[in-house]
Image: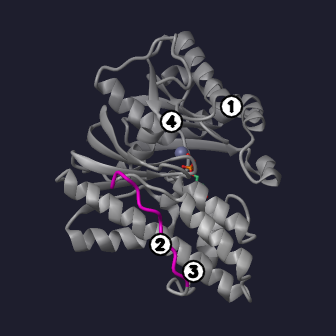
Amino acid sequence: MYILGIETSCDETSAAIVKDGQKVLSCAISSSLDFHRRYGGIVPEIAYRMQLETITYVLDAALKEAKIKLKNISAVSVTDKPGLLGSLLVGVCLAKAVSFSLRIPLLSVDHLHSHIYAAFFNNKTIKFPAVALVVSGGHTSLFYVQSFDQIKLIGQTQDDACGEAFDKVAKILGLGYPGGPYLEQIAQGANAKKFKFACSNTKAPLDFSFSGIKTALFYQIKYQKPKNKKETADIAASFQETVIETLINKSFLAVKLKKTHSLILGGGVIANCRLRDKFTAAAKENGVKLYFPQKDLCMDNAAMVAGLGYQLLKLGYRSGLDLAAGSN
Ligand code: KG4
Ligand code: ZN
């Protein structure tokens, strides 16, 4: 069964064809990131205008690469929340048009839940229940996952998202945007113990807070300018290490509290190699099975939307043409 996935929650415009929830036949992605760079963040108006212009080309590219005709699609799955409203609307409208014109089922998926699904493409035997950590530019959330349609939020950031903190710290350090990959690059091989940073405590143990560490780093730089590139790299590495350790501590605490043995990771920040290595070591130490997506499926993409849509279709879910973007 071929499912068409559509993802337009932020700056990406993506369409994918996935067979039986497992085989990614194509995943076309167009990003408006270059147009946002000069503003140092995503400008919603630019994002959705670009999405309107590109979405049909992206759909064509996905069909062509998969060597599939639109009429052979069995269902269409689309991200309906959370995200930028104008952007979500572009994807939802196209999905409705495809569903209506072909008389095929329409599925709506939550963006964060689809980030969790990304790990299922390269790990076919993930056992439920599991704890899932989703770390992206807009969210840092812990979930208790009992099945593809029973996903409960058990912790989340109280202020900045983890990726957002990476981006803001990279900006303070004078690196490029989005900052995560740049920060990881300069932190490589640097001394992560040189500077002492800490993530603020939260009232609920499974919640997160990243704005304090970002502010601490801002004042560190303001009052004690790094003397050279090596010192900047040490600051970046010390920040990165502290954030990763916090993510590890909270995730494994959730695994313990929920008495599971599986931990799934998803979201853009999971592309970070240091994070992947440190989680892998911690999982080994704690006897926990760890699953994360291949690097290119950590970032926003429509394959994960098609994959989760397939599972929801099998469970009997359908969305109507009255589907609204951005609602809960
Ligand atoms: O999931 P995603 O593609 O989009 C959202 O749903 O937000 O995540 C984008 C975020 C950005 O904040 C970016 O800086 C971060 O993921 N990111 C990274 C790395 N690659 C991307 N953060 C740390 N290290 C990386 N290698
Ligand atoms: Zn995302």
Q: Which residue is mark 1?
A: 55
- Report the Cα–Cα distance between label 2 and label 4: 38 Å
Q: Are marks 2 and 3 in contact (CB under 8 Å)?
A: no
| Quadrant in which residue 153 is drawn | top left
* Residue 180 to residue 27: above or below: below
Q: Is mark 4 within 8 Å of ligand 2?
A: no
Residue 54 left/right relative to 262? right
**Which residues are the magenta region?**
195-205
Residue identified by numbered label 3: 188
Residue at the left extreme of this rendering = 259
User: Mark 1 and mark 3: span between their CA atoms?
Assistant: 37 Å
Which of discs 2 and 1 lies nearer the camera? The answer is 2
Question: Mark 1 vs mark 3: which is more N-terminal?
Answer: 1
Residue drawn at point x = 44 percent, y = 55 percent: 208
Q: Which residue is drawn at the image coordinates 24% and 56% (left, top)?
A: 255
Q: Tell me the SS state at disc 1.
A: helix
Of the residues tagged 1 and 4, which is closer to the observer? 1
Q: Which residue is mark 4?
A: 17
The three-letter amino acid code for the residue at tag 1 is Ile
Residue of label 2 = 242
Residue 36 vertical position relative to residue 13 in the rendered view, above or below? below
**Residue 194 or residue 326, whichever sits in front:** 194
| C-alpha separation, residue under disc 1 versus residue under disc 4 | 15 Å
Q: Is residue 107 left or right of residue 138?
A: left
Q: Position of residue 177 (x, y in %)?
A: 71, 59
Q: Residues within 10 Å of mark 2 (few under 14, many from 20)?
A: some
Q: Residues within 10 Å of mark 1 (few under 14, many from 20)?
A: many
Identity of the residue drawn at 78% across and 53% down: 37
Q: Say which of marks 2 and 3 sits in front.
A: 2
